[in-house]
Image (spheres, rainbow, N blue to C red):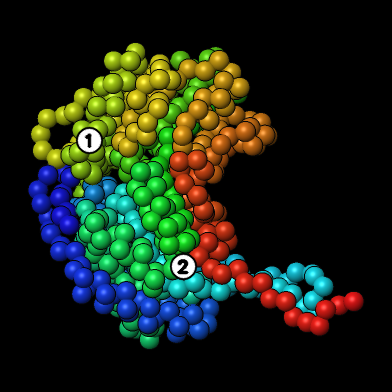
Amino acid sequence: MIAVDPTTGVELRRVEPADEAGREEILAAAAAAAPPWRGASFDRRGALLRGVAARLRAERERLALLMCEEMGKPIREGRGEVDKAAWCAEHYAEHGEHYLATERLTSDASSSYVQYLPLGPVLGILPWNAPLWLAFRFCAPALMAGNPCVMKHDPHVPGCAAAIGAIFDQEIAEHGAPAGVFINLPLATEDVEEVIRDPRIRAVSFTGSDRGGAAVAAVAGSVIKPVVLELGGSDPGIVLADADLDEAARVLALSRIINAGQSCIAAKRLLVEEPVYEPFVERLEAQLSAFRVGDPRSEQTDVGPIARGDLRRALAAQVEETVTAGARCLLGGEVPEGGGFFYPVTLLAEVPTDSAAFREETFGPVAAVTRVGDAEEAIELANDTPYGLGAGLWTQAARGEAMARQIETGQVAVNGIVKTDPRLPSGGVKRSGYGRELGPHGIREFVNAQQVWVGPART
């Protein structure tokens, strides 16, 4: 497990993955924590999460710099991510009990209801692109539901993983919570299957590629364990002739450069109606050309480097293939000289529907714009993908709401940026995964919805 600074390409740190004895110790601790945490009140669970949130905010600068170092996130974005993770912990501390309230249902019983009970230890398998936020998106609802959490973070962000684990260790000790209620498990990829199969792990949450998700789902399914998959996306952003073009260009440009474009739910295929195609592209180019690429530690930087060299090479190949297929490159498109894994903000126009940038997920600051004749063609092309994570619609609000029902994605934003929010469920369909995270739906993914029937029967 090696962390490399994407700004320089220089190795930062190495962490040895847990050996067999280390894995056993961690799984045993999580299993031992399950009964007392199951019995803990919502107030006690919430107190732990509130304490963790306060410590996150107190250590905001250090955590943001860790993300700069290990995956190239600009420092301003890093601070925002820490705050969002803290907000997620606080949200579930406040609302978890309400989300899991017993549901009374009428039947032939004297009393019948559904109660939501913990499952036991949940394994979270996480990617590198939002190290703090994705960790808390997984663990905050699971912990509040009474489940211990075992975090297997991406091997390229070991410092971030260790920092999250240390914060929990401190707050667990401070609040007298069971020692194994949250544990960072530095796990080699080849050992993941063994841990999924371990009977002490009762459920799995996976965020990552569709290929990785398919492998995790196959293993979990073979031992009949619930799994939530949040996978990749090739999200459409539809701009129709009645849209506010200035606002659409501003928001869609921002969507393409947040985290250097390394976001699953960011709009990647921009489908623009013919009458406003040229003026929209002009506005989008103006917005994109204003962003500053540079050292993520600088307050002036908008776009940091791509996280790894192999990811940059894959992105450059997609852009080259798309231009060869007939797209026009209006901005960027060439790998810069010098150290690190930087890639310029890039705008591709007239992108063919059979090209790489249209058919594949592009994980970088690349906007791909395709001309469409009308709303019907836009919907058809939006759905012409194996993915179905998120979508953006830019049109009159009522029209956008009506169109949302025709879009095959797990979430749709009308006249706004597609984002995750602790208050709202997030997830995909098709090869973008299944299950939901966040909101009241997310906390119910890893519980036993137990039906209770109390007699005598009513006559």
Query: Image quadrant of residue 23?
Result: bottom left
Kind of residue at disc 2: Ala
Dot 2 falls on a residue whose secondary structure is helix
Depicted 214 relative to depicted 149: above or below: above
Quadrant the C terminus occupies: bottom right
Q: Quadrant of the N terminus?
A: bottom left
Amino acid type at mark 1:
Arg
Point out residue 116 in the picture as x, y percentages from the top left corner: 59, 71
Asked if 419 appears above or below 454 in the picture, the reply is above
Q: Residue at the location (33% across, 15% down)?
A: 325
Vertical comparison of 5 with 143: above or below = above
Identify the residue at horizontal 12%, vertical 55% (top origin): 12
Q: Is residue 116 in view? A: yes
Label disc, if present, on residue 383 of the rendered structure: none
Q: Residue furthest front?
A: 222
Circle 2 sits on which residue?
142
x 54%, y 68%: residue: 447
Q: Residues within 10 Å of mark 2 (few under 14, many from 20)?
A: many
Q: Position of residue 212 (x, y in %)?
A: 34, 48
